[in-house]
Amino acid sequence: MKSNSNNTKLILLHPYIQKQGSSNRLWLLALVSFFTLAFLGTLIYSRESIVAGAASRVALVNNPASSSATAAANEPLPTTVINALIHYASRSNDTYHMSHKDIKLISDVLRKCATPCNLLVFGLTHETLLWKALNHGGRTVFVDENRYYAAYVEERHPEIDAYDVQYTTKMSEMMELIASAKEQVRGECRPVQNLLFSECRLGINDLPNHVYEVSWDVILVDGPRGDGPDAPGRMSAIFTAGVLARSKKGGNPKTHVILHDYYRNVEKICGDEFLCRGNRVESTDMIGHFVLERVDANSFQFCGHNRTAS
């Protein structure tokens, strides 16, 4: 009779099998942990988004004015407001104020301009605040010959952006300056150029750099003084307006240039010379309205058919 001990079976597990079972459990644990964290992250993010959205809606309800401030700033002025501004500005007791007819003409040009409109004005005058208001939502820059008056206006009206320029011309030199510009039409007095680097006697080159980079939609020439032979006259302002319009880089390719006091010799002669009679679209006793288009950089003629360099 055999002993029961002979029937005992010994079962040994190979170490590799034990190690593999442990590894599988670790991978399973890592996988469960990953999905748990992902779920919690999604839940937290969704909750924050819902809270933020709700807060925005509450703010919009409680303060609708602030939410629409940006949109309102770019909206054009209502016609009733424009008409009221023109009415009261033209009824001023100031001797040098513009007539209702002339202000209306300029206002109509600004209203047709796409918003925002870039308006450059030569001269700080009785209508300065009016131009700023009528170009609501746009960019308006003023240039004046009197640095002290420009500083005074900016101090009194911080919303006005004004710069002074030192004119070196005299009205008595007008014909000489025109002849010099014609002689240098392929050099320093080119119709298309960056005037910041120009040595043309009629070009204004001492304004802040950014003024030369703006694509001006409307340029109003109502300064500097032109009341005597030693006054600077508006030769440089008109020449500069013509170059800025033809050198326009972006936006609408057309620029409206408006000359005030168009009945005077300087304004009429220089306007016809550098803005060109063929570009004049309307005129009154006091206003000359020209529309210029940007031209090729190799154009070397202000008026007529533009000849390009060979």
Image (spheres, rainbow, N blue to C red):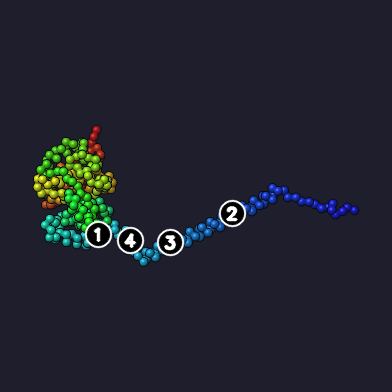
**Is residue 258 depicted above or below 178 in this figure?**
below
* Residue 192 visible somewhere in the drawing: no
Nearest to N terminus: mark 3 or mark 1: 3
Q: Amino acid at mark 1?
A: Leu
Q: What is the secondary structure assignment of the residue under circle 4?
A: loop
- State the separation of the CA atoms marked 2 and 1: 63 Å
Disc 3 packing (10 Å; few <14; some 14–19; many ≥20): few
* In front: label 3 or label 1: 3
Q: What is the secondary structure assignment of the residue under circle 1?
A: loop
Residue at image mark 1: 77
Q: On residue 31, which mark appears? A: 2
- State the separation of the CA atoms marked 2 and 4: 49 Å
Q: Amino acid at mark 2?
A: Leu
- State the separation of the CA atoms marked 4 and 1: 15 Å
Nearest to N terminus: mark 2 or mark 1: 2
Disc 2 packing (10 Å; few <14; some 14–19; many ≥20): few
CB-based contact (under 8 Å), mark 2 and mark 1: no
Residue nearest the viewer, comparing 161 with 181: 161
Residue at image mark 3: 52
Residue nearest the viewer, comparing 191 with 113: 191
